Amino acid sequence: MDIFIKQISIINENNYSYYNPKNFDIFFNNPDEKKKILITIDDAFSSFYENAWPYLKENKIPFILFVSTEPIGKYGYMNWDQVKEIEKEDFAFIGNHSHSHEYLVDYEFNDFKKDIDQSIEIFKKKLGYNPIFFSYPFGEYSLEQKNYIKQKFKYAFGQHSGVI
C-alpha cells in the first residue's frame, strides 16, 4: 500500500488531473494539452477492496475496476456486494474483464465469444447493465477478438509488448 500511495503522490506532485470514468466520453473525444491520467485496477482482488479502495474513496480518486465475473465471490476476490458498493460512487466505474480471465488469445473464436457473452449476461444480472469499458485479460487479443469486442463495448484496453 505504501508504494501505491507514493505513486498517487507522484501523480499529484506533477500536477496531473484524473480522468473521471463517468465523463470519459467528453475527455476522450476532446483532447487537450493538460496532463491527465486514468487509473485502472484489474481483477477485483479482495486486497484491493481492503487496502486501496478505502484510500481511493477517502480521496475521491477516479478509477475503473475491471472485473472478471467467474472468480467473484471466491477466495481472494471481492464479492458482488462489494462491487456494487464501489459502483455506486460517482468517481468509480466498473469494467468488464471477461468471464474466465484466461489467456483468451489462445481460445477458439467461438469459445472466446462464449466467455465474453457469459460475462455480459452476468453483469446484466448482477448490475443491471453491461459496462462500456473492457480490458483484455493479459492485455492481448487477436484482430478477430478486437472486432467482436468493438460490437459489445464502447472502449477497450490492452497492452502492446515489444519495441516501440
Image (cartoon, helix red, strand yellow):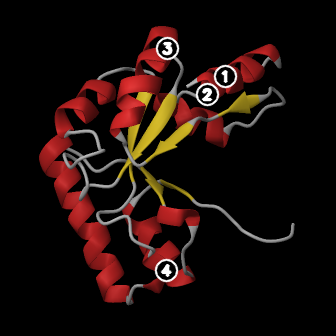
- Of the numbered discs 1 and 3, the one sitting upstream in the chain is 1
Q: CA distance from mark 1 to mark 3?
A: 12 Å
Figure check: 106 above or below 155: below
Q: Mark 2 against mark 4, which lies toward the viewer?
A: 2
Figure check: 70 above or below 59: below
Q: CA distance from mark 2 to mark 4?
A: 30 Å
Q: CA distance from mark 2 to mark 3?
A: 15 Å
SS at mark 3 in the image: loop
Q: Which residue is labeled 3 in the image?
A: 60
Q: Is residue 33 left or right of residue 3?
A: right
Query: Which amino acid type is shown beneath numbered disc 4?
Result: Val
Figure check: 11 above or below 69: above
- Of the numbered discs 2 and 4, the one sitting upstream in the chain is 2
* Residue 6 in picture, x, y percent from top left: 69, 21
Task: Give neighbour class at mark 2: few <14, some 14-19, many 20+ (Cα, 10 Å).
Answer: few
Q: Is residue 150 left or right of residue 110?
A: right
Query: Which amino acid type is shown beneath numbered disc 1?
Result: Ile
Q: CA distance from mark 1 to mark 4?
A: 32 Å
Query: Which amino acid type is shown beneath numbered disc 3?
Result: Lys
* Residue 90 in picture, x, y percent from top left: 40, 20
> Which residue shows up at 42% across the image and 39% down it?
65
Q: Which residue is labeled 2 in the image?
A: 4
Q: Mark 1 against mark 2, which lies toward the viewer?
A: 2
Query: Which amino acid type is shown beneath numbered disc 2?
Result: Phe
Q: Which residue is labeled 1 in the image?
A: 8
> Which residue shows up at 54% across the image and 74% down it?
141
Circle 2/circle 3 CB separation < 8 Å? no
- Of the numbered discs 2 and 3, the one sitting upstream in the chain is 2
Q: Which residue is labeled 4 in the image?
A: 105
